[in-house]
Amino acid sequence: MLLSTDIKYVAGVGPAKSKLFADELGITTIGDLLGYYPYKYIDRTKFYTISELSDQMPYVQLKVKVLGMEMRGVARKERLVAIVADATGTMELVWFKGVKYVKNQVQIGQSYVVFGKPTMFGQKMNIAHPEMEVLNAQTLEKLTGWQAFYNTSEKMKSHYLDSRAISRIVAKVLQDEMLNFDETLPPEVMERYHFMSRCQALHTIHQPATPQELKLAQTRLKYEELFFIQLDILKKSKRQRQRFRGQPFTKSGELFNRFYTECLPFPLTGAQKRVIRAIFDDCRSGRQMNRLLQGDVGSGKTIVALSCALIAIGNGFQAAIMAPTEILATQHYQSISQMVESLGINVKLLTGSTAKKQRTIIDQELQDGSLQLLIGTHALLEDKVQFSNLGFVVIDEQHRFGVAQRAKLWTKNTIPPHVLVMTATPIPRTLAMTIYGDLDVSIIDELPPGRKPIATYHYFDNKRQELYGFLRREIEKGRQVYIVYPLIHESEKMDYRNLMDGYDSITKIFPEYQVSIVHGELKAAVKEEEMRKFAEGETKIMVATTVIEVGVNVPNASVMVIENADRFGLSQLHQLRGRVGRGAEQSYCILMTKYEIGNETRQRMNIMVDSNDGFVIAEADLKLRGPGDIDGTMQSGLPFDLRIANLATDGEILTHARHDVEQLLETDEDLQTPEHELCRIRLEQLNRKKQNWGTIS
C-alpha cells in the first residue's frame, strides 16, 4: 500500500514539491520515486588533498578548514569566496547564489568535508557551490559508500530539489519500516540466477555500499524491466494468434508457379526462397500471419512480396501493397506491372493524385473482386477504399506509417488479412526482440548474384577537386551520380553545405551535363518529373536532400556523394548508399566532411568505409547513439520506457529474459498459479497507463 501512496506525504515533500515531481519527472507515488534510478554514482570513501587536485578531475571530496570569507566582484556580479586549507595547501570555495544562507551556515575556523567539481580560475583551484558538512565522527560514518546522483531540471533546482535533495527524500522513504516490496519475478527465475530480492535491489540501487553490490542490484533490475516488456509482448502475441484465425491458403497456385518459371527477371537467392516458404507455411497454417521481413537495400524484398501476393491471388483473395511515398508506390506499380504482364492480372495504382475517374473504376473493381492487386500510398487506408476479399497485405518501409494507420488495414476484411511488413533498415537483434517482438521475423541475408559490394571512401573538403575529376570520369563512362545535402537553404546556425548553393556550383563545374534537383519543398509533380528525367538518363547528376533515401531505383547510377556526412546517422548513411550498387557495374559512395571532426564522427565514417553489412552498421549505430535515435526503427523513440536497461549493452540479459518468458508462458499462459500471481499483478500494474496496440501489426 505504501508504494501507491502520494509522494506529497513523504517528509520534506508536501504539495508544492510533489507538483514539481509530477510535472518535471512524472513521479506521483512512492513507488514511482523508488523506480527513478540514479544515473551515476561517486565514491564517497576516498578523500583527496588540495595538492592532488586538477581541473581534469570529476567530483572529489576533501577535509579542509575555513580560514576566511569575503565578498568579491561588484553589484550584481558579487560572489562569496571562502579560503580553505589542509596540510598541503589552500584553495577557494565560491558561491554566486544563496550567499546569505551560506554566510549563516559556514563558520570560520570550522573543519568541513567539502564535495564538488574542481576547476581552475586564474592561478587558483576552486570549487563552485560545493556540498559541505561539518567534519566529525558522524559525518565520516555516513561517508562509507557511493553517493547516487539523480537527473533533475533547472526548475526543480531553483526550488531546492537538486540531486542531493532527491537523495535525502529517497533515504527517508527507505528508512520506513512499513515499506514492503513484494517479489515480482517468478520463484524459478529467482532460483535460476540467484538474484537478490527486489527489496534488497531497490535499497542497493539508491544506496550502494560497494561497486560489486551495485552491479548485482543493477543486473537484477535490468532483468526485471526486460522480463516484463517481453512478458507483455509475448502474452499479447499469443492472445492475438488465438483470437484471429487467418484465411488458409491451401495451394501455391498456378499464378505463382507461372511467375516463378516464366517471369522472374533473375533466379531467386536461397534466402528469398527460404522466406517465401516461411510466409506460405504461415498463410496455410490457419492462423493470421504477422511477419517482419528485413532485408538490406537491394536484397530483393519486392520480389518476395509479389510472389506471396500471387499465392494469395491464386487462392481467390485480393492483395495490397502499401508504400510510404507516391514515388515508391509508382515505382512498385511500374516494375510489378511489367513483371506480371503476361499473367493477365488486374493491377492498379492508388495515390493521393489518382484522377477521380480512375478512382471510381478502382473502387468499383475492388468491391466486385475483379481488381486483384492494388498498389498505393496512405490512400489505401481511407474508409471509402473497400475490398471484396482482402487476404494479403504488404507494408513497405513500415516504420514510416503510424501504428493507428496500420491498424486500419485490419478493418478491410471480416477476417483480418495476412500482413507482411518490410523494412530495408536492418534492425539490431535487441531492438527487433522488443519493438517487433510479437512478429515472426525473416531476414534476407544475401544479395542477388552479380552485385558488387559498394566501395566507400571518406574524403575531406580539401579533396574536392579530385572528387569532381572522378565524377567526370564516371559520367564519361555512361554512369550517373547522386549528390546529397543535409540542408536545402543556407543556415545561420549551422555551418553546413546546402543544396541550393551546391546546385549552383555543380551546374557551373559540369556545364556540359543536365542536372536534376529534388527536395521536399518542390511540388509533387515537379519532383516526379525530375526523378523521371534522372531515371531515364536525361540528366546525369541528381542534386537532392534525403527525400531520395527511399524508393529511387536507377541501376545506372554508380556514385553517391554525401555532403556533410557527419550530419547523418549510420543507418541513414547506409540507406543513402543503397541508392547505388543496383547494377552490375562497380559503384562508389563518397562521404564528405570537414577535416575538423570529433572522434565519434570519425568512428562512424570508419564503420561505413569498412562495412557494407547493414546489420553490422545497425548494431554499431545502436551502441553509438542509443535505441531512441536509430533512423528507421521508430518514429519517436521506443514504445516503452527503459529506466535502467540499455538495449545497446544489455543484449545478453534480454536474451535470457525472453527465453525465460517463453518457458513461463508454455507452462502457465495466463499466470494463474499461486507462485505466478504477483507476477501477473505486476504486469497489470505496468499496463494500466499504456495504450494497448498489442493486436496490431
Image (cartoon, helix red, strand yellow):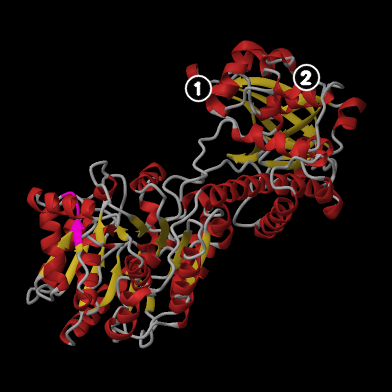
Which residue position holds label 2?
Answer: 108
Q: Residue furthest right?
A: 137
Counting from the top left corner in percent of width and height, residue 334 is at 19, 69
Compared across the picture, whether 186 is left or right of 119 comes to: right
What range of the chain is rendered magenta? 348-352
**Quadrant of the rendered image containing residue 328:** bottom left
Compared across the picture, whether 688 is left or right of 550 comes to: right
Task: Evaluate whether residue 497 shows in this view.
Answer: no
In the rendered view, would you say 312 is above or below 152?
Answer: below
Q: Nearer the viewer, residue 191 or 491?
A: 191
Counting from the top left corner in percent of width and height, residue 117 is at 66, 38
Question: Residue flagged by tag 2: what amino acid is it?
Answer: Ile
Q: Nearer the viewer, residue 506 or 638?
A: 638
Number of residues whose C-alpha sits closer than 10 Å to that of mark 1, classed few (under 14), some (14–19) or many (20 or more) = few
**Quadrant of the rendered image containing residue 430:** bottom right
In the rendered view, would you say 144 is above or below 360?
Answer: above
Q: Is residue 569 magenta?
A: no
Counting from the top left corner in percent of width and height, residue 16 is at 59, 12
Q: Determine the residue positioned at 50% across, 45% down.
A: 695
In the rendered view, would you say 542 is above or below 489?
Answer: below
Which residue position holds label 1?
Answer: 77
Question: Residue flagged by tag 1: what amino acid is it?
Answer: Lys
For the stretch drawn in magenta, what is the main secondary structure?
strand
Number of residues whose C-alpha sits closer than 10 Å to that of mark 2, classed few (under 14), some (14–19) or many (20 or more) = some
Local SS, label 1:
helix
In primary-sequence order, the first of circles 2 and 1 is 1
Task: Evaluate whether residue 145 shows in this view.
Answer: yes
In the rendered view, would you say 334 is above or below 627?
Answer: below
Q: CA distance from mark 2 to mark 1?
A: 23 Å
Compared across the picture, whether 40 is left or right of 359 comes to: right
Counting from the top left corner in percent of width and height, residue 277 is at 47, 74
Q: Determine the residue positioned at 60% across, 50% down.
A: 238
